[in-house]
Image (cartoon, grey):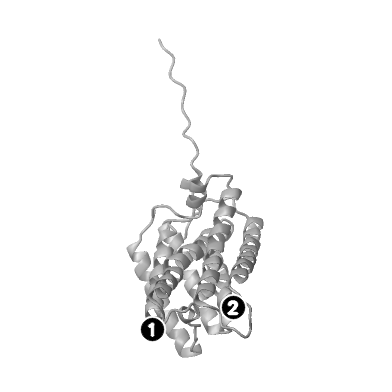
Amino acid sequence: MSAAPPETVPPENPISERVPTLDGYGGVPRTAARGIEIVVAIFVVLGLVLIGTLIVAAIDPTIGDADDETSDGGALGLQAIFELSFAAAAIGAATFANRSGLREGLRRLGLRRPSGPVVSTILIAIGAYAVSALALTALLQPEQKDIAESLGADADSALLVTIVAGILIAPVTAFCEELFFRGLLFGGMRQRLPLWPAAIASGMIFGALHLTAGDLGVALQLSILGAIFAWTYERSGSLWVPISLHLVNNTIAFITLIS
């Protein structure tokens, strides 16, 4: 009589483990990113932006000169550095914290197929943001800075400038900022906090980034938008959902601004 084969133990799959969610849907991936990695990533963003600004300023003398208006090329270069710094810091933090390769690091940031409902999540998010935006507009009348104009894109600008500005404002910004603010920041907070505290905290940091224009109403509106994006990530289980919503929002805003 032959001996029974030894029982095999299935290998662990940390990606399949998810933080429990309030509604049982989706969830964010387990990640080893702690507070220290997030703080370091923030400083990496600041360092990359500073170094990139110095490089662009060395090429374009209009940058930093109070008497000259920044050229279109200089403004576009600064915007590209600003956004790409978010992506570089998030990817670097995720791969380092999880001791993984690039592909695994991106999965830990949420770049994977949805594991929860997508259509209903998008519809609820759009409705929630529409209601909050209408309420804030009535109460605070936020005035957002025309970033398209600051990048040289308007009805009279060169076609190439408008195209590059549109690419930076819509797909590049949506992808890079979601990687950092939802993939790394919210994803890291969510390992230790319930859904809404993590979503609100990360949303407030996202909104505070836009306080440079000096409009508190805009910062509050974008804080709510950031929290809603975090919820869509949690419910769908994929960062591609808030990336898509962010892309649509920025595309509509860009087309409206240059019209």
At label 2, which amino acid type do we have? Answer: Thr
How busy is the neighbourhood of tag 1: few (under 14 within 10 Å), some, or many (20 plus)?
A: few
Instruction: Give the total number of marks visible in the rendering.
Output: 2
Q: Reply above or below: 2 against 232.
A: above
- Determine if residue 23 is in view: no
Q: Residue at x 55, y 66 (%)?
A: 81
For residue 47, side relative to residue 141 (left or right): right
Observer-nearest of 235 and 63: 63
Decide: is 170 above or below 33. below
Residue 198 percent location from the top left of the image: 55, 64
Mark 2–mark 1 Cα distance, whole angstroms, equals 23 Å
Q: Quadrant of the N terminus?
A: top left
- State the residue in front, 229 or 159: 159
The image position of residue 215, as x and y in percent, is 56, 84
Q: Can residue 62 be seen in this snapshot?
A: yes
- 20 to 81, vertically: above or below: above
Give the residue drawn at x 56%, y 49%.
Answer: 95
Callout 2: 10 Å neighbours few (<14), some, many (20+)?
Answer: some
**Mark 1 is on which residue type?**
Ala
Q: Residue at x 44, y 14 (%)?
A: 3
Which callout, 2 or 1, points at the residue further toward the start of the chain?
2
User: Residue 58: x, y in percent?
Assistant: 63, 69
Residue 73 image offset from top left, x and y in percent = 51, 73
The quarter holding residue 132 reads bottom left
Residue highlighted by disc 1:
155
Q: Secondary structure at mark 2?
A: loop
Q: Which residue is mark 2?
A: 62
